[in-house]
Amino acid sequence: MSTSFKKKIRLLAALLTVILLLAGLSVSTLAASVIDWTTTGSLTIQPKYNNTVVTGCTFNIYLVAEIDRESAAPQYNLTGVFQDAEDSSGNAVDLNDISTASKLESAAAALARYAGNAAPEDVIALASSSDTVSGLPLGVYLVVQTSAPGNYTVASPFLVTIPATDEEGTGWNYAISANPKLGYSSSPSSSSMETAGQLEHSQWVDFSKLVDNTFAQKAK
């Protein structure tokens, strides 16, 4: 493996690590001098709110890019429905042009908009928090949270590389652990709001003097 290739993959992996840390994710590392292309990786997701693991969340995982180790220059090749992905400005998503954390976040958001076009067989569904998905080919993965229990709000889409490097760029880890941070909303759930139209008039209170609505559901 060329020196430039090592630097490029370590740059993207380091940026991904920054995003993971900003999002409350943790990446453990194992010492290794070179990538073992014959192995596969794993991904464990444990969403948290205020440092407490939240159960009942679901996620979809997508392989969005493969690492072209045969190329003379280091290259991340978008795959499948993500090959033609564009950002909100109409620019093609290019993982080979990621130099800042904001660009990485933008790339994840852009790729997530194309995730709905993926074939069912290309979607890895994680139906239970803390589950581990094993046997993942090396590459770049997009993780999209599809649901959260109660009033928790889903985490933003994020990218992970398998393998990932440590902060020094000297070790490779094939078992990735992610702890995306959830939000929390005090607003009533959609199911609660849907019942409002079924209430009798006596169960409603006039708040027209306070807000630009004629009625609002009476608090229980």
Image (cartoon, rainbow, N blue to C red):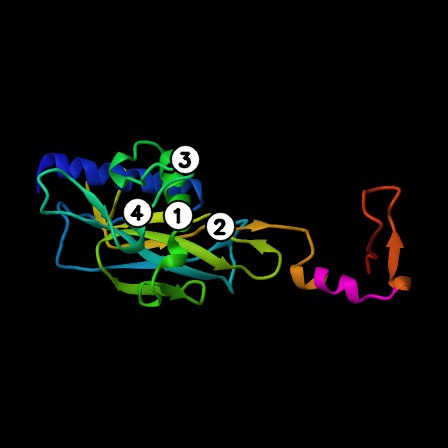
Which residue is located at x 34 percent, y 32 percent? 100
Contact flag, marks 1 and 2 (Cβ < 8 Å): yes
Dot in front, 4 or 2:
4
* CA distance separating discs 1 and 3: 19 Å
- Classify mark 2: helix, strand or loop: loop
Q: Position of residue 186 (x, y in %)?
A: 68, 51
Mark 4 or mark 1, earlier in chain: 4
Q: Height in image: 186 above or below 196?
A: above
* CA distance separating discs 1 and 2: 9 Å
Name which residue type carries label 3. Answer: Ser
Residue 27 visible in the displayed image: no
Kindly give the residue lying farthest to the top in the view shown: 99
Dot in front, 1 or 3:
3
User: Which corner quadrant of the image does residue 60 belong to?
Assistant: bottom left
Contact flag, marks 4 and 1 (Cβ < 8 Å): no
- Classify mark 3: helix, strand or loop: loop
Name which residue type carries label 1. Answer: Phe
Of the 4 image quadrants, the one containing the N terminus is top left
Residue 3 visible in the displayed image: yes
Per the rendering, the mark at residue 158 is 1
Which residue is located at x 35 percent, y 60 percent? 118
Mark 4 or mark 3, earlier in chain: 4
Magenta range = 193-200
Q: Where does label 4 land, which residue? A: 84
Name which residue type carries label 2. Answer: Ala
Q: Position of residue 2 (x, y in %)?
A: 8, 38
Q: Where does label 3 land, which residue? A: 89
Q: Height in image: 105 above or below 204?
A: above
